[in-house]
Image (spheres, grey):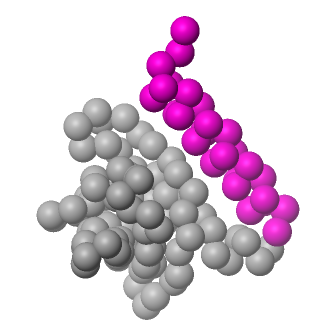
Amino acid sequence: MRTRSQLLARGVGRFNGCVLRWRAASPALRRRLTVVSYTGRRSGRTFSTPVAYRLVEGGAVIEVSLPERKTWWRNFTGDGGPITVLERRGHATAERAGRRVRVTVRFTD
């Protein structure tokens, strides 16, 4: 029998797969959605997740929707950490302001 967290992880994986297929099929979505890849601080595992973003000079900004339900952005609190966005390497930092979280990426390559 699967635990609740295993079922949730499976559901999130399926949802992310659907988002990536939609992104691949739509030029409009490609301008707003991308996949970020990063290494977990505690686990050391590499993760990839689709996110909405906007480009800014020298980097990108990711406004995390429903941040209380997501954990990926916590890898970038404090001094931040390495991230790959749009197949470019960068350094990301997360800032929390009330219920909002913004991840700012500065490209390093």
Query: Residue at the top extreme?
Result: 1
Residue 40 in the magenta stretch? The answer is no
**In this orientation, does residue 108 appear?**
no
Q: Is residue 43 above or below residue 83?
A: above
Query: Residue at the right extreme?
Result: 25
Q: Is residue 60 above or below residue 11?
A: below
Q: Residue at x 28, y 33 (%)?
A: 43
Q: For residue 105, what is the image quadrant?
A: bottom left
Residue 9 percent location from the top left of the image: 52, 34
Residue 27 percent location from the top left of the image: 80, 74
Q: Residue at x 51, y 47 (%)?
A: 48
Residue 7 in the magenta stretch? The answer is yes
Q: Residue at x 78, y 59 (%)?
A: 22
In magenta, the rendered stretch is: 1-26
Q: Is residue 45 above or below residue 76?
A: above
- Apparent side of residue 56 relative to residue 29 in the rendered image (left or right): left
Q: For residue 32, what is the image quadrant?
A: bottom right
By secondary structure, the bulk of the magenta-drawn segment is best described as helix
- Apparent side of residue 69 relative to residue 34 in the rendered image (left or right): left
| Picture quarter with the C terminus | bottom left
